[in-house]
Each structure stands twice: as structure tokens, then as C-alpha cells.
Amino acid sequence: MAGAGSESRVVKAKRKCCTSRPRCKRCPVVFKRLVAGDLAERVGKRRWAVSPELKKKTLKMARRRAIA
């Protein structure tokens, strides 16, 4: 069995963005920003596979503004 941290985690996004600041962790806009930074990939209509390399600081940046 490989290391437990090597697998991506699948997260379900909210149906609609609430546009509050900072954006919530399950906001679809945050996941789109993470895709732009190669830290997530879309699995289904509202499901995203989040990379195990995603750090708390990077998620916080994605919630506030776009990351690159």
C-alpha cells in the first residue's frame, strides 16, 4: 500500500457561489482558481479532486484572489 498522503481527495463544491469575501472553502470559484494553479482537477459536475500538495496557505490565497 502506498503512502496515505499520495492520493487526491475528492471534494463536492457548493451549487452556487455566494460572492462573500473571503470566499468559503467549498466555493466553485475557489476550485476554478486551484485548477489554474494545477492543484485540483475536475472529476464531475460539482466534484473536484484536490491535490495532496495543497497547503493551507495556498488555499487561503485562492479564497482571497487568483493564484498562478
Image (tube, rainbow, N blue to C red):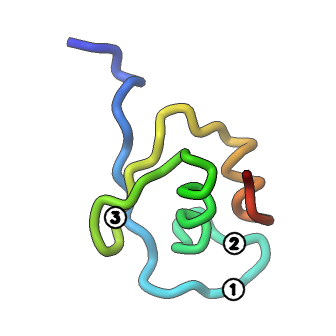
Residue 21 on image: x %, y %: 78, 77
Amino acid type shown at disc 2: Arg
Pointer 3 local density, CA inside 10 Å: few below 14, some 14–19, many at least 20: some
User: Which image quadrant: the N terminus?
Assistant: top left
- The answer to whether residue 44 is left or right of residue 60 is left
Question: Contact, CB < 8 Å: mark 2 with mark 1?
Answer: yes
Pointer 1 local density, CA inside 10 Å: few below 14, some 14–19, many at least 20: few
Q: Quadrant of residue 39?
A: top right
Residue visible at 34% across and 51% down?
10
**Could you tell me how far apart the alpha carbons at marks 3 and 1 are, in whole angstroms?**
19 Å
Q: Which residue in the structure is indicated by mark 2?
A: 23
Residue 46 on image: x %, y %: 35, 72
Residue visible at 62% across and 62% down?
33
Amino acid type shown at disc 3: Arg
Pointer 2 local density, CA inside 10 Å: few below 14, some 14–19, many at least 20: some
Q: Tag 2's secondary structure?
A: loop
Residue 28 on image: x %, y %: 52, 73
**Total numbered badges shown on the rendered structure:** 3
Residue visible at 68% across and 41% down?
56
- The answer to whether residue 15 is left or right of residue 67 is left
**Could you tell me how far apart the alpha carbons at marks 2 and 1 are, in whole angstroms?**
7 Å
Q: Which residue in the structure is indicated by mark 3?
A: 47
**In-front residue for pair 34/36:** 36
